[in-house]
Image (cartoon, rainbow, N blue to C red):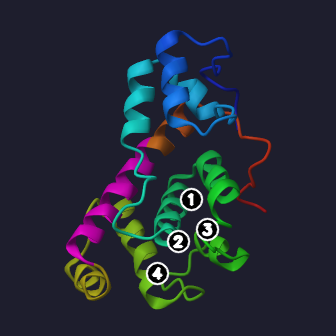
């Protein structure tokens, strides 16, 4: 990765930024480089946290993380992919093989159960065409409710935006996070 374009802020933070970190981060957690980069614009930082979709939604943690990992992989966001593997893969019960499936080019995502492979296909279609084909929509609808499909779409879009920030700002990779090649 090339040189960081926006150097992450260091503490002490201005009051609005410090309050946002306090409100949204677990006690004792140091803000990630992405968060400290976005802190250059407190409004963007606050809105990113407010719309992050990491709360308990209509889909389970495992499905959410598969969607996020595939989206970040397709967008080439090694930063966000690695952070999610490091912080959520174990809690989401994702095996090494499951994580590898989010990087692979297998159009059927055969390493995953069929209903989870559909999630990755949905991410792929949204990434490639900004829509979901009728056939895939019908398949998704056999396994997921309308509320869940909307969440799949929103998660994909949200992590496209986060990938845009990590890639365009060239956010330096976190030392604790795995890389695409590992």
Q: Give the total number of marks visible in the rendering.
A: 4
Q: Position of residue 175 (x, y in %)?
A: 79, 42
CB atoms at circles 4 and 1 under 8 Å apart? no
Q: CA distance from mark 4 to mark 1?
A: 16 Å
Q: Quadrant of residue 49?
A: top left
Q: Which mark is residue 62?
A: 2
Q: Which mark's residue is nearer the viewer, 4 or 2? A: 2
The residue that label 3 is drawn on is: 103
Q: Earlier in the sequence, mark 1 or mark 3?
A: 1
Q: Are the residues at dot 2 and dot 1 in contact (C-beta closer than 8 Å)?
A: no
Find numbered disc 4 in the image and state the secondary structure of the residue it sits on. Answer: helix
Q: Secondary structure at mark 2?
A: helix
Query: Could you give the CA–CA distance between mark 3 and mark 2, rounded to whole angstroms?
Result: 16 Å
Q: Quadrant of the C terminus?
A: bottom right
Q: Which residues are magenta?
A: 145-161
Question: Which badge, 4 or 2, comes first in the chain's sequence?
Answer: 2
User: Pointers 1 and 3 in contact (CB under 8 A)?
Assistant: yes
Q: Could you say which disc has been placed on residue 116 in the image?
A: 4
Residue 59's place in the image compared with 54, above or below, is below
Between the C-alphas of marks 2 and 1, the distance is: 16 Å
Mark 4 → mark 2, Cα distance in angstroms: 9 Å
Q: Quadrant of residue 4 in the image?
A: top right
Query: Could you tell me how far apart the alpha carbons at marks 3 and 4 are, in whole angstroms?
Result: 14 Å
């Amino acid at each position: 990765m090339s040189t960081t374009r926006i150097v992450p802020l260091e503490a002490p933070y201005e009051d609005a930024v410090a309050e946002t970190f306090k409100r949204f981060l677990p006690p004792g957690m140091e803000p990630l480089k992405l968060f400290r980069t976005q802190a250059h614009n407190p409004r963007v930082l606050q809105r990113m946290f407010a719309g992050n979709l990491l709360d308990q939604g209509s889909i389970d943690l495992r499905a959410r993380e598969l969607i996020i990992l595939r989206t970040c992989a397709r967008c080439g966001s090694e930063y966000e992919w690695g952070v999610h593997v490091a912080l959520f893969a174990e809690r989401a019960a994702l095996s090494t093989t499951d994580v590898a499936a989010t990087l692979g080019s297998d159009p059927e995502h055969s390493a995953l159960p069929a209903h989870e492979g559909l999630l990755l296909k949905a991410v792929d279609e949204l990434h490639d065409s900004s829509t979901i084909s009728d056939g895939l929509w019908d398949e998704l609808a056999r396994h997921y409710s309308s509320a869940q499909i909307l969440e799949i779409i929103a998660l994909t879009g949200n992590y496209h935006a986060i990938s845009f920030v990590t890639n365009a700002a060239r956010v330096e990779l976190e030392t604790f996070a795995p890389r695409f090649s590992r």
